[in-house]
Amino acid sequence: VSLRGQEMEFFVMDDDDGGDASQPSPADGGNSYLGCAAIKLAPLFLANPQPLEASLDLRDPRGVANGTLRVKISWEHPHLQERKAAMLAAAAPAAPPSPPKTAVKEPEAASAATAPAPAA
């Protein structure tokens, strides 16, 4: 699964509201769930990725704005394999055309000598 086309979702909870954090779903009446926000990860996969910084609207289960979430996402170790492959491909000289191959005919095997037929 490629992360290029994915989003990272953030679910924000309030642990100090006295609700049961193990049951955060708003469907069961818990009010510790404040909302969620999402950000697309595609910019992290550019040829020269920069840290991804954004202020995201935090939306409650009804879709109502419930605050702002500021995030900064960056690679600790950028995708070295993809970058290295791209750099090698760009730096490699074009391969010269290979000389035409000539067909070599194999000599045919000599037929086995037959012994003279026995006299009758």
Image (cartoon, rainbow, N blue to C red):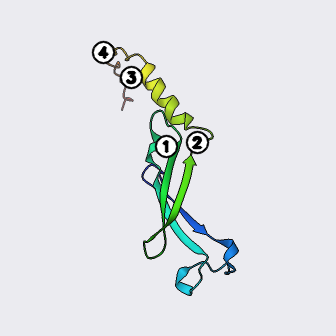
Foreground label between 4 and 3: 4
Location of mark 4 (residue): 102
Label 3: element kind: loop
Residue 73: x and y in percent read 56, 47
Tell me the tag on residue 75: 2
Figure check: 85 above or below 1: above
Q: Amino acid at mark 4?
A: Thr
First in sequence: mark 2 or mark 1?
A: 1
Marker disc for residue 113: 3
Q: Which quadrant of the figure has residue 104?
A: top left
State the residue in front, 62 or 103.
62
Left or right relative to 100: residue 95? right
| Kind of element beneath mark 4 | loop
Name the residue type under label 1. Leu
What percent of the width, then of the height, locates residue 36?
51, 66
Looking at the image, residue 42 lies above or below residue 118: below
Number of dots carrying numbers: 4
Q: Which residue corresponds to the image point at 49% horizontal and 49% vertical from the top-left?
A: 54
- Which class describes the residues within 10 Å of circle 3: few (<14), some (14-19), or many (20+)? few
The x and y percentages for residue 7 are 46, 56
Looking at the image, do the residues carrying marks 4 and 2 touch, with CB atoms under 8 Å apart?
no
Query: What residue is rendered at 36% in x and 28% in y?
Result: 117
